[in-house]
Image (cartoon, helix red, strand yellow):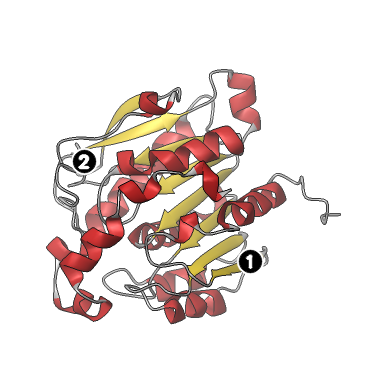
Amino acid sequence: MTSYLPWYLSYSLGAAAVAILSGGALLYHYQCEIIYPANFPEGSRTHVAKPSQYGLPYEDLTLTTSDKVKIKAYLIKHPDDNLAQARPTIFYLHANAGNMGHRLSIADVFYREFGCNVFMLSYRGYGLSEGSPTEKGLRIDAQTALDYVKKHPVIGDTKLVAYGQSIGGSVSIDIVARNEDKFSGLIVENTFLSLIWNSEQMIQQITRLPVLFLSGRKDELVPPAHMKELHRLLDTTGESIWREFPDGTHNDTCLKPGYFEAIKYFLDGIMGRRKDQK
């Protein structure tokens, strides 16, 4: 299924991140401008690609958070409400550089190939959203987005699956741990144990949901041992699936063979469509 993303590498967050950080260890010595490089690549704060460029139906949303910050979001939903209600919704939390528009090629796979609705946002200080990114702020943004989705007249009762890449994985672990009853599953990719976000503790609060771990063994920014430890710490009555990609780096793991097959297998399990399910 890697052919679904033929031009993904034309947007190389990896190059930007490596240029900024020059190695994962430096993450621990810088603050928000390094942890949240919202201005990379150039133009990320002024230009956000639209789902219409992919032929996707969508709503362009502006949400106001509890601390009065306006954040931007896209809802990519099946036009037929009955179909939309029967399909899962992906709650997409992006990595630490760029904006939600840079992830539309992945949203396109979720929508066209897997039949999902997709909700995605640009955190505060990213894309065209107001404010500046902080851990507290992103936590508020995620909660605001979740509240919107759960109150939506069409997708509010759909099976909701959080999907987070890199720092988005930490945001997703946090929002799911605090709202586990509102989700049906969690997918995390190349996520760290702790930096500012304390994923190490929060993941232990998830006790019911199925979780899919997607780990690039050649991740040059987040040591793969972090993902392995998150997997070890999870104690859930739901399914816990580990998928490792031998050549996957921090930003190209989604291009590796078997990546989207693993996600499809996981989603089929949530929807009760797998042949190996009783």
Residue in the image at 55% along x and 79% along y? 232
Looking at the rendered structure, which numbered label has been put on residue 190?
none
Q: Does label 1 or label 2 sit earlier along the sequence?
A: 2
Image coords of residue 35 (percent x, y): 21, 65
Q: Dividing the picture into quarters, in which one does residue 172 lie?
A: bottom left
Horizontal and vertical percent for residue 127?
Answer: 21, 41
Give the x, y percent position of residue 40. 18, 52
Q: Which residue is mark 1?
A: 241
Residue tagged by mark 2?
Answer: 127
In the rendered view, would you say 200 is above or below 96? Answer: below
**Number of labelled discs?**
2
- 261 displayed left or right of 103: right
Q: Is residue 214 above or below residue 232?
A: above
Q: Residues within 10 Å of mark 2 (few under 14, many from 20)?
A: many
Dot 1 alpha-carbon crowd within 10 angstroms: few under 14, some 14 to 19, many 20 or more: some
Q: Quadrant of residue 114?
A: top right
- Decide if residue 168 is on the left or right side of residue 71: right
Image: 23 above or below 265: below
* Real-space CA distance between mark 1 and mark 2, rounded to the nearest whole angstrom: 33 Å
Kind of residue at badge 2: Gly
Asked if residue 213 can be seen in this view, the reply is yes
Q: Secondary structure at mark 2?
A: loop
Front residue of 92 and 46: 46
- The C terminus lies in quadrant: bottom right
Q: Is residue 56 left or right of residue 194?
A: right
Residue drawn at (77%, 45%) of the image: 273
In the structure shown, which secondary structural element does the residue marked by tag 1 occupy? strand
Q: What kind of residue is marked 1?
A: Ile
Residue located farthest toward the right when viewing the structure as drawn: 278
